[in-house]
């Protein structure tokens, strides 16, 4: 696996706890953890330009859906089961999905359980995720009703582990509780996520724009926000801005 | 004409018509400070709010500080950033995975190789080829990252000296940094903004005289780097300016997630090269530099010592590179590998004549393949990854999301400087104005990385 799977230094757990009795209450009631719903792209045609590139191949009607890899159910393997078990014991039913991909684990967390979960992750002696180095957003327009994702990367100095939490929010009402009370350093990161994606972090001490000017309209890193750019004119030729060139993103 | 003329001390320049006038506001255009001082003296109000920057030599870049001052004592500081925001992350979504290196390197331009490194490692993790990298590729990455670490620390130390008013520190540091950048230019073709580390390997192999140049560089650095410590570390003025300044203990570092030299200045030996190794760092002997003073002085000493440790790593890399001469310097997979052999020619960089002859005169398939990889690029399976590495300023992480296509769906750089700017208030409030400037210098934030 990847180089990040450092074996954590950790006391031996007793025999009976290895059964992970709390994993059964990991998922929220009504969640369907086996369904891979992390749609990231829908593509049509052969060439992927999507801008009427003159596809004469006859494959225009093709439609393909791509989802992020790694949606899984217990057991997750390695120390993932230990922490998932402990997390489920402290905060039952917090997750809707779990993703294990390339040696990294992602918990999809219900927004109203987020702060409680972060507090448990930080304070519990079996978890000890002392810091949250990164908070950022991802915009998935294809995921109707949960278009905006907020991604939290957590680090445990004590056990030398990393996990990822992800919260799914509807574009129509993108509210999530702020984790600043638990991780004060998430302050700037949440401001940037508000600035770039328009996610509202309830309870944040001062949720203002941080990178864009204060009076800016719109949230630039959303997928529906254009890249901008102007055509570059040469003698006898014009080069279109990057977002309008014929693309090969297939 | 002075803005302060004919104004009473209750005028508020920034109030809209109808707004309550909160306090007197002055604008200084350079020569009218006497009037401002006189007016402030008459108003008998000790507390003033000063806007420092965004264009000010002591803010370590285009950063603005809103400071509330009582005399020279800082009551509160609010950093304001974003002046160098250029939308690098958004731009990366419109370029191929290989082109991403050229964008990532422009974030923290002083330590650009690290941005490329974290980005390329993240792409490789998404591709699942981390373990397939040839050893020479990792050696060349370690070579350039440690070279770049020295250049970055020299900038941080030099700019820190300059912010104390010690121009000779800056002169010595820039003199040595020029040597380092000359070597970087000889290897990658460019002094900065290199795009040298790419997904799947590095841009080009060492030139024929690469190891000789490295030997000469190391000889000069070993001779000259100790000079910086010799004329600063025992200097009483210097010690007075740095010791017990910008204090942050371990619990504060955890609260604000400080990493890099700031965290290690509390005595905590956390270095991702040791704790979560990448690029084969576990094979090199070096020490994690720490200090126990928790102040700007400790961070300064750590940066000086880390340069010595980088030289130690470079000596080991040198021997390994000599042993792996002629081996592959990038992944041997035609679906991922950049098709041409790039070389650093006398005019910078360029394609090898052999490759041009092959695709133009010998192989139609070779030409098609070249165009396919260069214009469309390769596909990366859908998924997400976060790869952190130990940059000169601390943890630098790249979060990448792929939709299975030939471009990043989302790229986010977790820059240590962006996170560290948050700790300016806790380091500065209650101290002197001059110490606040030193505190920022001890974080070594580079605005290109902070604002991206």
Image: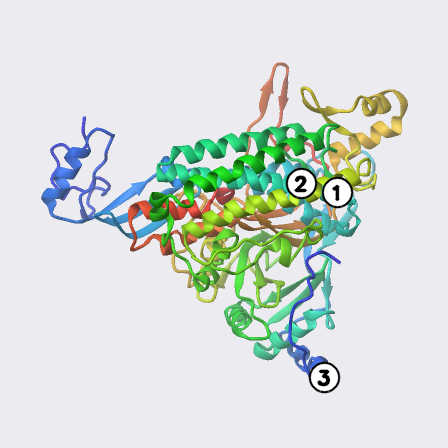
Q: Residue B143 carries which label?
A: 2
* Frontmost residue, B242 versus B73: B242
What kind of element bears circle 3?
Answer: loop
Quarter placement of the C terminus of chain A: top right
Of B125 and B154, which appears nearest the observer?
A: B154
Task: Give me the residue at 48% from left, 45% from top.
Answer: A218
Q: In this view, does B99 lie above or below A185?
A: above
Which residue position is annotated with label 1?
Answer: B320
> Image quadrant of residue B207?
top right
Mark number displayed over residue A40: none
Please identify, in this view, whether the residue under mark 1 or under mark 3 is nearer the observer. Answer: 1
> Compared to B4, does A62 lie above or below?
below
Q: How far apart are marks 2 and 1 (CA)?
A: 10 Å
Can you tell which quarter of the image residue B135 is in? top right
Q: Which chain carries label 1?
A: B
For label 1, the crowd category at 10 Å Cα-Cα, with few meaning under 14, some 14 to 19 and many 20 or more, is some
For the N terminus of chain A, give its image quadrant: bottom right
- Marks 1 and 2: in contact by CB < 8 Å? no
Residue at 71%, 33% in the rendered image: B211
Q: Which of marks 2 and 1 is in front?
A: 1
Please tell me whether mark 2 sits on a helix, a strand or a loop: helix
* Residue B345 in the image, given as x and y percentages of width and height: 71, 22
Point out residue B5 in the picture as x, y percentages from the top left corner: 13, 32
| Label 3 environment density (alpha carbons within 10 Å; few <14, some 14–19, many ≥20) | few
Q: Which mark is residue A15?
A: 3
Q: Are marks 2 and 1 on the same chain?
A: yes
| Color scheme of the displayed model | rainbow
User: At numbered mark 1, what does the secondary structure look like: helix, strand or loop?
Assistant: helix
């Amino acid at each position: 696996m990847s180089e990040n799977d450092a074996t954590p230094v950790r006391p031996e757990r007793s025999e009976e706890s290895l059964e992970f009795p709390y994993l059964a209450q990991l998922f929220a009631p009504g969640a369907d953890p086996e369904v891979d719903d992390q749609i990231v792209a829908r593509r049509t045609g052969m060439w992927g330009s999507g801008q009427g590139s003159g596809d004469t191949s006859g494959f225009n009607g093709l439609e393909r859906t791509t989802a992020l890899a790694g949606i899984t159910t217990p057991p997750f393997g390695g120390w993932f089961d230990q922490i998932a078990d402990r997390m489920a014991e402290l905060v039952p039913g917090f997750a809707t999905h779990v993703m294990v991909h390339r040696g990294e684990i992602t918990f999809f967390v219900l927004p109203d359980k987020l702060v409680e979960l972060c507090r448990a992750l930080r304070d519990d002696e079996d978890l000890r995720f002392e810091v949250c180095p990164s908070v950022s957003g991802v915009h998935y327009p294809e995921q109707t009703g949960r278009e905006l994702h907020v991604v939290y990367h957590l680090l445990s100095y004590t056990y030398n582990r990393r996990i990822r939490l992800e919260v799914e929010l509807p574009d129509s009402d993108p509210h999530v509780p702020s984790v600043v009370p638990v991780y004060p350093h998430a302050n700037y990161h949440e401001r940037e996520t508000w600035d770039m994606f328009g996610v509202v972090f309830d309870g944040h001490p001062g949720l203002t724009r941080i990178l864009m000017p204060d009076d800016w309209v719109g949230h630039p890193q959303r997928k529906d926000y254009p890249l901008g750019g102007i055509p570059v004119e040469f003698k006898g030729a014009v080069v279109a801005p990057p977002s309008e060139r014929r693309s090969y993103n297939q | 004409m002075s803005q302060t003329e004919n104004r009473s001390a209750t005028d508020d320049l920034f109030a809209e018509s109808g707004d309550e006038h909160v306090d007197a506001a002055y604008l200084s255009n350079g020569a009218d400070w006497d009037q401002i001082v006189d007016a402030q003296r008459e108003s008998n109000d000790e507390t003033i709010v000063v806007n420092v920057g965004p264009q000010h030599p002591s803010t370590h870049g285009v950063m603005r500080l809103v400071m509330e001052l009582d005399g020279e004592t800082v009551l509160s500081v609010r950093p304001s950033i974003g002046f160098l925001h250029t939308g690098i992350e958004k731009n990366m979504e419109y370029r191929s995975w290989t082109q991403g290196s050229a964008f990532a390197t422009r974030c923290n331009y002083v330590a650009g190789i690290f941005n490329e490194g974290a980005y390329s490692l993240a792409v490789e993790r998404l591709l699942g080829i981390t373990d397939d990298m040839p050893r020479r590729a990792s050696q060349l990455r370690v070579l350039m990252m440690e070279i770049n670490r020295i250049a970055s620390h020299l900038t941080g130390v030099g700019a820190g000296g300059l912010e104390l008013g010690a121009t000779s520190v800056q002169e010595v540091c820039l003199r040595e940094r020029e040597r380092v950048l000359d070597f970087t230019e000889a290897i990658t073709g460019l002094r900065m903004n290199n795009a040298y580390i790419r997904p799947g390997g590095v841009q080009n192999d060492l030139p024929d005289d690469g190891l000789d140049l490295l030997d000469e560089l190391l000889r000069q650095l070993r001779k000259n780097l100790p000079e910086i410590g010799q004329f600063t570390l025992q200097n009483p003025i210097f010690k007075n300016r740095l010791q017990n300044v910008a204090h942050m203990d371990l619990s504060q570092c955890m609260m604000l997630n400080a990493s890099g030299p700031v965290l290690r200045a509390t005595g905590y030996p956390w270095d991702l090269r040791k704790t979560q190794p990448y690029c084969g760092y576990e094979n090199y002997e070096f020490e994690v530099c720490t200090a126990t003073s928790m102040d700007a002085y400790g961070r300064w000493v750590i940066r000086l010592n880390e340069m010595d440790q980088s030289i130690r790593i470079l000596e080991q890399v040198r021997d390994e590179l000599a042993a792996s001469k002629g081996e592959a310097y990038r992944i041997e997979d035609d679906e991922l590998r950049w098709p041409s052999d790039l070389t650093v020619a006398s005019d910078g960089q360029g394609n090898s004549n052999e490759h041009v002859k092959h695709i133009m005169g010998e192989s139609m398939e070779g030409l098609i393949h070249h165009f396919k990889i260069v214009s469309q690029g390769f596909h990366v399976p859908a998924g997400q990854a976060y790869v952190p590495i130990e940059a000169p300023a601390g943890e630098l992480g790249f979060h990448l999301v792929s939709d299975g296509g030939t471009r990043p769906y989302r790229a986010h750089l977790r820059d240590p400087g962006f996170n560290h700017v948050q700790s300016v208030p806790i380091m500065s409030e209650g101290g002197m104005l001059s110490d606040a400037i030193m505190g920022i210098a001890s974080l070594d934030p580079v605005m290109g990385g902070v604002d991206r």
